[in-house]
Image (spheres, rainbow, N blue to C red):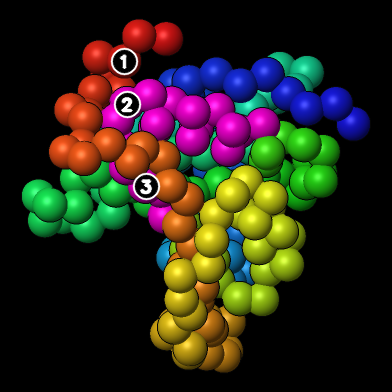
């Protein structure tokens, strides 16, 4: 399968994104949410994210096949150069290269915006996600055993880091809404 075209998500993508994400919430431990967000809530999440961070979708044959986005790592000011990243791919598009393509573009944008590091949280077991993150240059920084309870059992979570900018002092962060695409 060929990989898709990457573009910035829009509110109109909320239904397709929710359609990919809802089964992950309901049937897997990939997401620690327990109730899937509605299409309206997903549209709000997209809009809220795009002010500061990228939110991308991958399309194939005019259908959204996956999405990736960034958000704040922690709320305190000194964390502002670090971001959390997330990626979800439709089951029919997994192992097609779309995840790698989405992450490549997302990480490129985050680096250009001036962020210092990207962090990913992976509920275990998830060999596909672990392999992708390792291939994308993320390094394991730790694991929290039995940190969440979902689908009838305790879940471990691993934490991964990818360096983006090493500048000291750090660069000024360019909000995504001001980012020249």
**Placement of the C terminus among the 4 image quadrants:** top left
Other residues around mark 1 within 10 Å, as few (<14) / some (14–19) / many (≥20): some
The image quadrant that residue 74 belongs to is bottom left
Residue at (58, 82) in percent of width and height: 151
In this picture, which residue range is highlighted in magenta?
101-119
Task: Indicate whether 47 appears above or below 161.
Answer: above
Q: Nearer the viewer, residue 107 or 98?
A: 107
Residue 77, percent across and down? 9, 50
- Locate residue 56 relative to residue 61 in the image: left or right: left
Q: Secondary structure at mark 1?
A: loop
User: Mark 1 sits on what residue?
Assistant: 179
* Depth order, front residue of 109/21: 109
Query: Circle 3 — which element?
Result: strand
Q: Residue at x 68, y 69 (%)?
A: 126
Counting other residues with Cα less than 10 Å from the Cα at mark 3, is it few (<14), some (14-19), or many (20 or more)?
many
Q: Position of residue 136 (x, y in %)?
A: 62, 46
Q: Residue 52's spot in the image, x, y percent? A: 25, 30
Residue picked out by circle 2:
113
Confirm whether residue 155 shows in the render.
Answer: yes
CA distance for labels 3 and 2 = 11 Å
Quarter residue 178 falls in? top left
Tell me the quarter of the image containing the N terminus: top right
User: Which residue is at the front of the view, 125 or 93?
Assistant: 125
Measure the alpha-carbon separation of dots 3 and 1. Answer: 18 Å
């Amino acid at each position: 399968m060929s990989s898709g075209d990457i573009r910035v998500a829009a509110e109109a993508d909320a239904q397709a994104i929710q359609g990919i994400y809802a089964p992950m919430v309901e049937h897997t431990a990939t997401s620690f949410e327990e109730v899937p967000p509605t299409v309206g809530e997903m549209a709000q999440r997209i809009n809220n994210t795009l002010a500061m961070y990228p939110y991308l979708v991958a399309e194939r044959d005019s259908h959204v096949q996956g999405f990736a986005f960034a958000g704040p790592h922690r709320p305190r000011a000194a964390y502002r150069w670090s971001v959390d990243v997330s990626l979800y791919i439709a089951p029919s598009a997994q192992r097609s290269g779309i995840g790698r393509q989405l992450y490549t573009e997302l990480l490129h944008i985050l680096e250009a915006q001036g962020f210092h590091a990207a962090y990913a949280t992976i509920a275990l077991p998830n060999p596909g996600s672990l392999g992708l993150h390792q291939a994308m240059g993320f390094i394991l920084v730790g694991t929290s055993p039995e940190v969440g309870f979902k689908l009838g059992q305790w879940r471990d979570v691993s934490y991964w880091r990818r360096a983006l900018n090493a500048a000291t002092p750090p660069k000024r962060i360019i909000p995504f809404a001001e980012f020249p695409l």
